Amino acid sequence: MKLYLQVYMFGKQDVPTLTSLAADVLSVTPHMHVKRYFTIKEIDNQPEVKDVNIRQRKCRFNDESDLDVYRYYSYSACTVQCRKDAQMNKCGCAHHLMPNTTFKNQCKFNGLRCLSANYNELSILKAKWANKTGLYCECLPSCTEIELSVLRDDIEGILSEYAVVELILDRLPTERFKRNVVKGKLDLVAF
């Protein structure tokens, strides 16, 4: 039996979810030496951005969380909350591995059967306009999330009984997205 370890590569706010991209996950076993090369694009926010209404700026800062599954906001944490809410609405309970679910709200046998019977509807995320079966989540992106791009993985065998994983920033960030406020509240004041 081979032991697999999954290494998730995300920004500091993100959490692993059912819909995490396979490209963001490394599966490693003993006797492997993996080098993952990646790049980062950051988002920089002007301080005045925080004064703009969430719906206007179309993003949330991590301390603007309205979630009960995680303390801080991220897009991925919001999709976990959306999935938990859908499970509660459809089956009257949430999966026992769902974060911050009280014992009384955890699914028992019949609840787990309900989750299994409605797996596609409760697990696959879809766009609002899509006609396929799935779950639409009205989640805003995080205002500070980074964009990680995997360039390549170099994998070679080693004699050791363990695995070696190296995460290598291929080059320093050369691009940065900036979010600026063009007209603030005081720009409308006339004397």
Image (cartoon, helix red, strand yellow):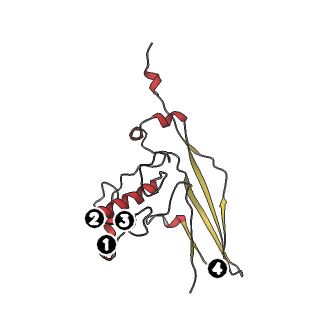
Query: Mark 1 or mark 4, which is nearer to you?
Result: 1
Give the residue number, with chain letter if any, for mark 1. 111
Q: Badge 2 local density, few (<14 within 10 Å), some, or many (20+)?
A: some
Q: In this picture, is 185 found above or below 112?
A: above
* Picture quarter with the C terminus: top left
Check if mark 3's residue and mark 4's residue have beta carbons within 8 Å: no
Q: How many marks?
A: 4
The quadrant holding residue 116 is: bottom left
Q: Badge 1 local density, few (<14 within 10 Å), some, or many (20+)?
A: many
Q: Earlier in the sequence, mark 1 or mark 4?
A: 4
- Distance between the Cα atoms at labels 1 and 4? 37 Å
Check if mark 1's residue and mark 2's residue have beta carbons within 8 Å: no
The amino acid marked with disc number 2 is Lys
Q: Earlier in the sequence, mark 1 or mark 3?
A: 1
* Picture quarter with the N terminus: bottom right
- Relative side of 117 to 102, left or right: left
